[in-house]
Amino acid sequence: MLTLKNYQHICTANTIKHFHLCRMNTGVSLCHRDALRIYYEGAALFRRKLRRLWLAQRWSRHIERCRQRQLL
């Protein structure tokens, strides 16, 4: 089962049917549509993490090139 701290963990939480946030229930029903929304949100989160890593690597390479230019 998915553990949610607040409704912001799922971007479409306001539009998910049967979504209730409380201590007794994580609030996400396991019907087909909700399960797909959770899956796609997880995939989107993974893509955002990969993009942040890619941008950090690009930025590091850019800084290194700038340092090399200053030394010349």
Image (cartoon, rainbow, N blue to C red):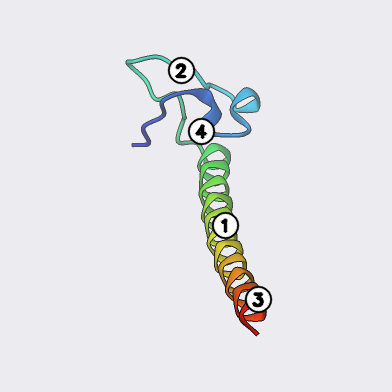
Per the image, the residue denoted by label 2 is: 21
The CA distance from mark 2 to mark 3 is: 55 Å
* Foreground residue among 68 and 71: 71
The mark tally for this picture is: 4
Sequence-wise first label, 3 or 4: 4
Give me the disc on residue 9: 4
Sequence-wise first label, 2 or 3: 2
Q: Residues within 10 Å of mark 1 (few under 14, many from 20)?
A: few
Q: Identify residue type, mark 1.
A: Arg
Kindly state the secondary structure of the residue where label 1 is placed.
Answer: helix
x 51%, y 33%: residue:
9
Evaluate if marks 1 and 3 touch, with contact meaning CB atoms under 8 Å apart: no
Q: Identify residue type, mark 2.
A: Leu
| x and y, in percent, of residue 5 in the image | 41, 25
Vertical side of 49 occupied by 5: above or below: above
Vertical side of 6 occupied by 47: above or below: below
| x and y, in percent, of residue 40 in the image | 57, 49
Kindly state the secondary structure of the residue where label 3 is placed.
Answer: helix
Question: In the image, which is nearer the foreground, mark 1 or mark 3?
Answer: 3
Give me the disc on residue 52: 1
Q: Quadrant of residue 62?
A: bottom right
Q: Identify residue type, mark 3.
A: Gln
Per the image, the residue denoted by label 3 is: 70
Furthest residue in direction bottom, as rendered: 72
x 55%, y 28%: residue:
8
Kindly state the secondary structure of the residue where label 2 is placed.
Answer: loop
Vertical side of 13 occupied by 30: above or below: below
The CA distance from mark 4 to mark 1 is: 18 Å
The CA distance from mark 1 to mark 3 is: 27 Å
Question: In the image, which is nearer the foreground, mark 4 or mark 1?
Answer: 1
Sequence-wise first label, 1 or 2: 2
